[in-house]
Amino acid sequence: MTAAEDEDDMSDVIDGLQNEVNAALLGSDWQALSEMIAPDARIIGPRGYIIDRDMWIGVHRESEYQQVRLDVTESDARQYGDAGIRFDVVESECRYKGETITGRFRVMQVWVTQRERWQLVAVQYTSAAA
């Protein structure tokens, strides 16, 4: 197998993992999120705030919050040793306390593998102009 084929295979792995996270976000599946997101993960929101995994998952457990849409319009995944990074442009819609919130974001997700288990360790959202 060539280095290019290895990189393509790794991109497929990262893509599959991130698609599982997106499905869990849309389905409010906090148990799946707990498995896929590292306990010490950090999430940086579009306004610069930093939250930990439990706070992020907690929002998705709340009955007042619902992720309605996560449409990935651009995506690029890359491998760096035992880490993978995926860059997306995402059209998002959610409802929180009866209010609909929409936005377009550039999202960077950092995945690492330890003992043959991949986990999401960092996410950064940046507001993106249309």
Image (cartoon, rainbow, N blue to C red):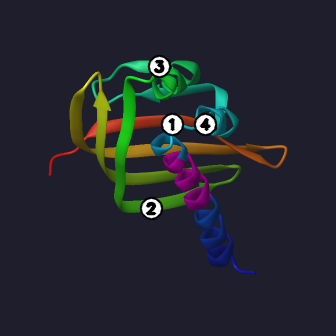
Q: CA distance from mark 2 to mark 1?
A: 25 Å
Circle 1 is placed at which residue position? 28
Q: Which residue is mark 4?
A: 33
- The amino acid beneath tag 2 is Asp
Q: CA distance from mark 1 to mark 4?
A: 9 Å
Which of the two discs, 2 and 3, sits closer to the camera? 3
Q: Residues within 10 Å of mark 2 (few under 14, many from 20)?
A: few
> Tag 4 or tag 1, which sits nearer the N-term?
1
Q: Earlier in the sequence, mark 2 or mark 3?
A: 3
Front residue of this view, candidates 29 and 105: 29
Q: Quadrant of residue 4?
A: bottom right
Quadrant of the snapshot with the N terminus: bottom right
State the SS at label 3.
strand
Q: Residue at x 58, y 52 (%)?
A: 20
Q: Name the residue at 62% across, 68% down.
A: 7
Q: Is residue 20 magenta?
A: yes
Q: State if disc 3 and disc 4 touch (CB < 8 Å).
A: no
For mark 3, what is the residue? 51
Q: Quadrant of residue 44?
A: top left
Determine which of the numbered discs, if any, sits on residue 76 in the image: 2
Mark 1 and mark 3 lie on one chain; the one further toward the N terminus is 1
- Residue that appears at 37% across and 23% down: 64
Disc 4 residue crowd, few under 14, some 14–19, many 20+, Cα 10 Å = many
Region in magenta: 14-23
Q: Please, is residue 82 above or below residue 44 in the view?
A: below
